[in-house]
Amino acid sequence: MLQSTLLVKQLKSGSKSAFNSIYHEYYEMLLYVSLQYVSDRDDAKEAVQEAFVKLWTNRDTLKETASIRNFLYTIVKNNSLNVLKKREVMLRSHDNIRWMEMHYNYEAMSRLGFDSIEFKELKQKVDQAIENLPEHCRVVFKMSRFHQLKNREIAEKLNVSEKTVEAHMTKSMKLLKGELKPYLSLLFFLSDIFS
């Protein structure tokens, strides 16, 4: 405890050697903690580096009795959780973009009067796959994709939480991907929409 208090004092006064000591003492442990959340070494390293940067830039505000270990652990945990949130948003965004691409291509082909057997079959399969979704998923999916409502708007209309809407959309996308994957190779412009 005495050594920790001394390190905090030295750190607060801008001692780079105190910072280096802290870095070498906690880096591996913090990297391990982050890896338990993010499972990617580069993301984990970044989460840990950001924690040490925050420690250095906020050293003036530390109390001399502060636990550096707890301070760093909390920041690394929060940074790691933020990485997971960003990944989730990116995946959701990626799925949305790919679905919209398919939807616009589908609409364009319809307007052009494309009447091949393959296109008719795919149209039937898409329509059937959507109708086969569980009721709540189907309602949320149609509101999102065909009426272009945001999750917040859907949540308000259905009197549910945004998290519930997100869960229904995630489930819908997973079910549609599984059901439609065999048919997407029929049309070259849709060949990897759900891959």
Image (cartoon, helix red, strand yellow):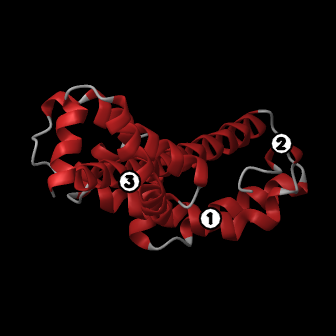
Q: Which residue is mark 3?
A: 81
Label 1 packing within 10 angstroms: few (<14), some (14-19), many (20+)? some
Real-space CA distance between mark 1 and mark 2, rounded to the nearest whole angstrom: 18 Å
| Residue at 66% in and 63% down | 177
Q: Tell me if label 1 and label 3 are in contact, CB under 8 Å.
A: no
Q: Earlier in the sequence, mark 1 or mark 3?
A: 3
Q: Which residue is mark 2?
A: 189
- Horizontal arrangement in the rendering, residue 6 relative to residue 123 (left or right): left
Tag 3: residue type? Leu
Real-space CA distance between mark 2 and mark 3, rounded to the nearest whole angstrom: 36 Å
Tag 2: residue type? Phe
- Horizontal arrangement in the rendering, residue 194 relative to residue 169 (left or right): right
| Residue at 36% in and 30% down | 16
Q: Which mark is residue 78?
A: none
- Horizontal arrangement in the rendering, residue 154 relative to residue 31 (left or right): left
Residue 33 in the image, given as x and y percentages of width and height: 42, 62
| Residue at 21% in and 51% down | 4
Residue 114 in the image, given as x and y percentages of width and height: 84, 41
Callout 2: SS: helix
Regarding residue 31, the answer to whether it shows in the image is yes
Q: Is the N terminus in the top left, top right, bottom left or bottom right quadrant?
A: bottom left
Callout 1: SS: helix
Depth check, front residue: 173 or 112:
173
Q: Which residue is mark 1?
A: 176
Does 133 appear above or below 99? below
Q: Earlier in the sequence, mark 2 or mark 3?
A: 3
Residue 61 in the image, given as x and y percentages of width and height: 13, 32
Q: Is the C terminus in the top left, top right, bottom left or bottom right quadrant?
A: bottom right
Q: Earlier in the sequence, mark 1 or mark 2?
A: 1
